[in-house]
Image: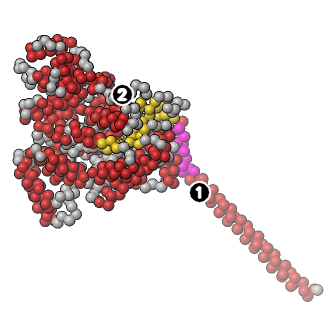
Amino acid sequence: MGSNSPEVDDTQSESSDVRRKSAETLVTESQSLAKRGRRPLFYVLAVLLGLSPFVVLELSLRLLGVEADAATTDLHDGFDEDMRLFQPDGDDLLTTDIGRERFFVKQTFPTVKPPGEFRIFVLGGSTVQGRPYLPDTSFGSWLQHELNLADTERTYRVINCGGISYASFRLRPIVSEVLTYDPDLIVVATGHNEFLEDRTYAELKSRSAVRLWVENQARSLRTVMLLRRLTGGAARVEPTTQTAAAPKEIQTRLDDPAGYVSYQRDDAWEAGVVAQFADSLEMMDDACQAASVPLVLVKLGGNLRDCPPFKSEHGAALSVEDQRQWQDLFDRATLEDDTDPHAAIATYQQALQLDDQFALLHFRLGRCFDQTGDFAAARTHYQKACDLDVCPLRMKSSLAQQQTAIAAERKIPLVDAAAVVTASAAEGICGFESYIDHVHPTIFAHQLIAVELAERLMQLQLVPARQVALVRQRRVFCRDLMTELGDIYFANGRRRIGWLEGWAQRKRLQQELDPVDLRGFVAAASRNVDLHRFEDAESDLTAALDLNAAPAVVEDLARRLFASGRNLDAKWLLSMLASRYEGQKLPDSIATGILAVAMDENDEATLATAAENPAWQGRPLTDVLKEDTTGWGAAFGVADGGR
């Protein structure tokens, strides 16, 4: 045993070493694991420390009562179908969500439809909203008044869902929403913004549902809201008389990367937009049919005569040499068209043989044919200029045709507002006397659309087939409303039209809008009167009367204003005309116009002077209007019974 003892000791020593090394390894591994375990915690703490200033800022903003962006701004510009247009306002009302007021004007209506109420929702873009004014003078509001005047057994309520720059794609979820509010009728007037929306909002339209959800959660953060406001993302504020004047250099939407540069001739893209327009109309019709709610479509028109195309491009097949020759012809015709429109037509047509795709060339041809009296040819070329516009901010023929085809195929009633307004325009070509800019109807044109829509609803028996409002009844109502709105209403309209012109960068084409004939000066005057720019209107009218001393075209404008309830504007025009005959006998038509306005306003001083007019031989003044053949008696409504 003694001889084996060292061997035993060596074995025990080796085992001890192994155990010691194993223990050391276990300690090392434990320390390593502990370090690795602490590493994620370290990262979490580091991230939290980095975020702490933002957390403090967020909490501070909340304590200061700063609202969430979700309550003030529609981050997705209407492309998030889960964001509703109307929200509960107390227990009994629904009101336009404040986050949507960047695009919509506030509307409020009862959650539960009152007994005897006929509820109509009118959807569309800024035309439906009534821009550059407000819904008070939109065709939807005039429709409400027209129906209430004609039918006293029910109460008609029209809710305006016109969104600025909204195309049919963004109207689809709104139709689905308003169908839950017990409507009796839905009216959709759309078509002007299809190409604008597809370029300006292409990235927004393609966002996934997951991204929309994440961004919606971010909207609830006050810090995000503050950053948006600091970078110009605040909601649009309606102008008032206290609103500061716009800066001289207006940043226009058409100047940004989604602006003019992004618009190029692309037939495939245009076909896709038209197809999407058709899909949207069909989806809205499907939703209305499923809810058993009638749908009526409105075909919109635009300004052809006083709106040059926004962007023109040559055809792709034009060679460099042909383009040089084309430009030489175009420049020569430009020098000719102010003095010799016949010669200009011949030269422009030579350029047309080389390239017929340049939209501005067709506009110039339309203007020349206008001056020579060939109005059919003028209209053809004006429409061609609209359809070839590479930056199409007016409804193209392709869209109008698609809308007509879908209405016919699906048996959807279609009200042709474009035709109604065109029928009232000089020579059947719409200019500034019909549209205050490129697409927005004048107040008078809105009234025409409302009357046509009311008559059509009666024909369709969607509302009781009663007599539409009498001429005088309608005019007196319009007069009282326009008097109530006052000059501030027009002043704010002037501000909005300035925004629109800056947005569309119209100054680039101002030379194309300079009047060159009698009609052009009267149309420019009409627009300036609509905006209450009376000094500019007087300058235009003076130029018009210098071209043609006969005051008939100016009287027509005054009668139109009078018929639409704008007595003060008609009175200003008549006074301006009368001043040209100072010391002379007034033409009967001007005198009769002054009489009509005085009778409508019960202006005793003017009526006393009129009664002494020898030409009227002391007859009752009402009889003078009844026998009038100049149109003032009809505008007054003597057939309805005068005072």
Instruction: Name the image quarter holding the C terminus.
Output: top left
- Dot 1 crowding, Cα within 10 Å, few <14, some 14–19, many 20+: few
**In the picture shown, does residue 358 fall above or below 290?**
below
**SS of the residue under disc 1:** helix
Please tell me whether residue 415 belongs to the stretch shown in magenta: no
Q: Residue at x 83, y 82 (%)?
A: 10
The mark total stands at 2
Image disc number at residue 150: 2
Amino acid type shown at disc 2: Ala
Q: Main secondary structure of the magenta part?
A: helix
Q: Position of residue 211 (x, y in %)?
A: 49, 53
* Residue picked out by circle 1: 43
Write down the region rendered in magenta: 48-62
Q: Position of residue 228 (x, y in %)?
A: 43, 44
User: Residue 57: within the magenta?
Assistant: yes
- Horizontal side of 314 relative to 8 (left or right) equals left
Q: Determine if residue 140 is in view.
A: no
Q: Secondary structure at mark 2?
A: helix
Residue furthest to the right in view is 1
